[in-house]
Amino acid sequence: MSAERIASVGPAAGAEAVVAVRAAAGRGELPRAWRVGGLAAVLAVACVLPFVLTGFLVFQFTLVLVYAIALLGLNMLTGYNGQISLGHGAFFALGAYTTAIMIDRWHVPYGWTIPAAGVLCLVVGFLFGIPALRLEGLYLALATFALALAVPQILKYFDEWTGGSQGIVLSKPKPPWGLPISADQWLYFLSLAVTIVLFTLAWNLLRGRTGRAIMAIRDNPIAAEAMGINNPLYKSLTFGVSACYTGIAGALSALAIAFVAPDTFNIFLSITFLVGIVIGGLGSISGAIFGAVFTQFVPNYAQDISKAAPWAIYGIFLILFMYVMPRGVSGTLRVLVYRLRQRQRG
């Protein structure tokens, strides 16, 4: 399609043209019936897990769901919009502290604190994204890196609200309506429900006109702007939505762990999130799940293998993943499915 033709069909269609290659056949997608059946099977297994696993494993899988939400938010920003962030640990902390302060200081029911954390992080992320519009690539990464460094230190100076270095201790919410399940099981199902809702919203957002515009900015910002896409607005909105997802994840984390402290939200958390989306697969919704599993379990396995040098083992795992699956887990699976279908057609 020529440049004149692209310009004549309008911003939405133009954005679709920019990302047409990515939407073309050959991405290795499974047939719709297989995808629906596989998703139903995954959800069925997810609902059964809390009843067959120990309490500690239920807690770990709750954190997998929490990390999946955070990684999906970061993936929308980095994988789909091309903005590199090393500061999403700050939004995770903001969401966690919003929930902790509202419950501990204001005695607000925990159910209301989750959307409140998301809205607050949405506003903060959008406002942070406005001055960040002047920055791109490594310069934007450096600015968000500074944010991740500053927030934990700032939290220590408001003792009356944040508890200072000691943090805030919470009580895990009890199951409502007299449900015969434990607190860990209830938090797992709550996190699962929030995960399903947020993943569905992200799927609809990224498949629509807004998603095509977001990806067009990533692929070629100059061409996207020439076709009438408001780059500053879409980039700021993407930053805000990404922060919103991460803040909701932080709120769920505060409920699941029942404790927040500034030192738990250090810069390593932000780097871990970035590693998670690369391992799972950039520009992939399902990649957030794979990345969350890696984020939660691989460090624990590394520590089991060598208590003297667990991060050395973690580094080896990371190198192996990048060597074997350079496209991430989701991208590698997509390539394998595509090659399998090509063989069947041949």
Image (spheres, rainbow, N blue to C red):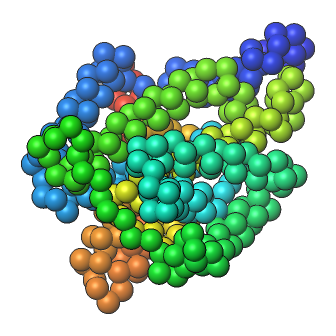
Q: Is residue 11 left or right of residue 165?
A: right
- Indicate the quadrant containing the C terminus: top left, top right, bottom left or bottom right: top left
Residue at the outermost bottom position:
308
Q: Is residue 265 left or right of residue 257?
A: right
User: Residue 172 location in percent, x, y?
Assistant: 30, 58
In the rendered image, the vertical position of residue 6 relative to residue 337, given as above or below = above
- For image coordinates 87% across by 16% down, the residue present is 7
Residue at the front extreme? 106
Image height check: is 62 above or below 339?
Answer: below
* Residue 219 percent location from the top left of the image: 73, 36
Residue depicted at x 25% and y 78%: 305
Viewed as shown, does residue 276 lie left or right of 182? right
Count of marks, rendered view: 0
Q: Quadrant of residue 330?
A: top left
Residue 224: quadrant of the picture: top right
**Rendered residue at 64%/79% (across/down):** 157
Image quarter in which the N terminus is found: top right
Q: Nearer the viewer, residue 47 or 4?
A: 47
Is 307 situated above or below 46?
below
Q: In x, y percent, where is residue 199?
A: 45, 34
Q: Which of these two is toward me, 33 or 142?
A: 142
Q: Position of residue 35 (x, y in %)?
A: 33, 23
The one nearer the camera, 203 or 164, is 164
Judge whether residue 242 can be spotted in this image.
no
Q: Is residue 65 visible?
A: yes
Which residue shows up at 36% across the image and 48% down it? 65
